[in-house]
Amino acid sequence: MTNTIKSTKSYLLKDLLSERIVFIDGAMGTMIQNENLSEADYRGARFADYESDLKGNNDLLSLTAPELIKSIHLSFLEAGADIIETNTFNCQRISLADYGMEDLSRELNLTSAKIAKDAVDSFKQANPNRHAFVAGSIGPTNRTASMSPDVNRPEYRAVTVDQLRDAYREQVDALMDGGVDLLLPETTFDTLNLKAALFAIEDAFEARNKRLPVIISVTITDASGRTLSGQTLEAFLVSIEHASPLAVTINCALGATEMRQFVQDLSNACPTYCGCYPNAGLPNAFGGYDDTPDDMADVLEDFAKRGWLNIAGGCCGTTSDHIREMRTRLAKIERRTVPERSSRTYFSGLEVTEIRPDSNFLMIGERTNITGSKKFSRLIREKQYEKALEIAKKQIDGGALVIDVNMDDALIDAEAEMTHFLNLIASEPDISRVPLMIDSSKWSVIEAGLKVAQGKCIVNSISLKEGADAFIAQATLAKRYGAAVVVMAFDEEGQATDVDRRLEIASRAYKILTDTVGIAPEDIIFDPNILAVGTGIEEHDDYALSFLKAISELKKTFPRSRVSGGVSNLSFAFRGNDVLREAIHSVFLYHAIEAGLDMGIVNAGQIAIYDELDPKLRDLVTDLLYN
Ligand code: THG
């Protein structure tokens, strides 16, 4: 990965962003609309006999009216845009299918990229000192991967991540072949769609051994400050950080005035460059946009003066006049300073769950686990999903800030049940607000889960059990889906049970994950194996104590990573005696948290309070744990 080629223009763009506010163009659609084109103009000679109406199919104009598209690019560049967007917003198979034109995807992207490059070349001849970059515009498609279009079938999806990824890959390849300088997946209304685009982009970069800068844009649809798929802006940022975007911006849906709060929030939370390219106000009664260049520049000038902007531009309703006014007024205002990155660990569902180095213990609910709960197992087997969802809800009500989902059972189709259950969870905001821990001993089941979650999940788990190659392959995929990873203390030799082996395996895993795979230390969660004590087998007697020692050692050696464990494993020998089991968990957690345990899989809501334990019981349990 380290020797991947980056283009000269990517350095130029980074330099420019480090110097000043960078301007992106306005809306291609508005400029086209002002031309009052007829059905015949859209068709040109090539599509004169096409079976359906083509008026309004703006992306097609790259084939039928290339000179017009080039002249629009030029007018934005002349108005002061540093970045122009290719005319490819809907140019992937899924959206093109509306016109029966899916097979034109490659040609449209390639041609549009060339037109934009051509405009840049013409412009640079006349203005050799100006910057001009071509961004490959990648729209969200007309379908949504994390919501059902059918209220009676909440588990149904009109598009899958695999379909999106394939469609986006074709688009990205064509845009890159056409020579774009950066990629702009934009107008995100569903983070899962975007994650599929980011996945395809990463695949394309890997295949070419070449990277381009990626700027992401998200659309906040209303005053709630959330995306259409329900995420807060912060949760959105956490969900896409794995892709290391050069910048994150907000566009569309709202005018600059309505965006104010969200632009401020983005500026506060975003660990990279950021900005906005709003619509020219909210749509009027005729679906048009009324903010004049002056109106819009007034608001953006204020944003810039407050230090919120690295990038500014326009979306629906904006023309080259809007960009010209914006550039004139913002040109001399200092760019936003990018805040320091923190070393916290973040996960996301619709909302963010975070672990700060100094924070309290994070509870992960264990009950949505087929092997860990007879009740959950029965409900899934009997397809009583409503009741199975109630178990998840109950774990959250009991204090779980993450829920562990496990469908491992020889008698069920674990991949299908994982997909089904997580799709159902996505339609329950009370549950999907928390991040998911996807638990399986089979990678294919974990991957099935990752494919339907828009947030930043936790993969539970990977290990060196089958050697470094399998470990690297799984970790690479986890990263590409934007998940954190639980690493079990297990290698080719077997399960680690003493402190030294736990540390040795953790060190090897850490090195591979950070050096070879490029996973952030904060996204590594060590699980040094909580094993059952009091089994009657002598060598098990030391298991709890050595786990506690391993926690402190791991925290010392890897201060930016986290430590977790499956707490209920500890008391397996006392099944049937819940009072005793709860006391064991309570005493163990008391010491484990003190030693630095960051998180644990527990029966949330069913942990005895340490201070309220019968002192005699507490002492006996302490003796058991400390051997
Ligand atoms: N580390 C990681 N993941 C894990 C574990 C771990 N996932 C699974 C497991 N261990 C943690 N989850 C559970 C869930 C339930 C129980 C134990 C661990 C449990 N269940 C009762 C029992 O088996 O007696 C079931 C009782 C019932 O059916 O109601 O104890 O260590 N990374």
Image (cartoon, rainbow, N blue to C red):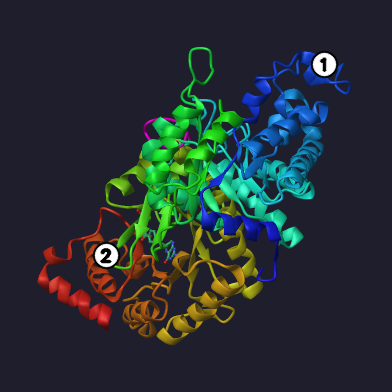
Residue on which disc 1 sits: 51
- Judge whether 306 appears above or below 521 on screen: above
* Foreground pick, 249 / 320: 320
Dot 2 or dot 1: first in sequence order is 1
Asked whether disc 2 touches disc 1, contact meaning CB atoms under 8 Å apart, the reply is no
Residue on which disc 2 sits: 581
- Some atom of ligand 1 lies within 8 Å of the CB belonging to the residue at label 1: no
Q: Position of residue 118 (x, y in %)?
A: 78, 42
Q: Quadrant location of the N terminus? A: bottom right
Secondary structure, mark 2, is helix
- Judge whether 624 appears above or below 30 on screen: below
Of labels 2 and 1, the one closer to you: 1
* Foreground pick, 406 / 61: 61
Q: Amino acid at mark 2?
A: Arg
Report if residue 437 lies within the magenta region: no
- Judge whether 189 appears above or below 397 on screen: above
Q: Amino acid at mark 1?
A: Glu
Q: Is residue 508 visible?
A: yes
Q: Position of residue 225 (x, y in %)?
A: 39, 36
* Residue in the picture at 68% in, 41% down: 163
Judge the density around disc 2: few (<14), some (14-19), many (≥20) Cα neighbours within 10 Å: many
- Judge whether 196 appears above or below 564 on screen: above
Q: CA distance from mark 2 to mark 1?
A: 71 Å
What residue range appears in magenta? Answer: 221-228
Q: Is residue 200 visible?
A: no
Q: Position of residue 283 (x, y in %)?
A: 49, 20
Dot label at residue 405:
none
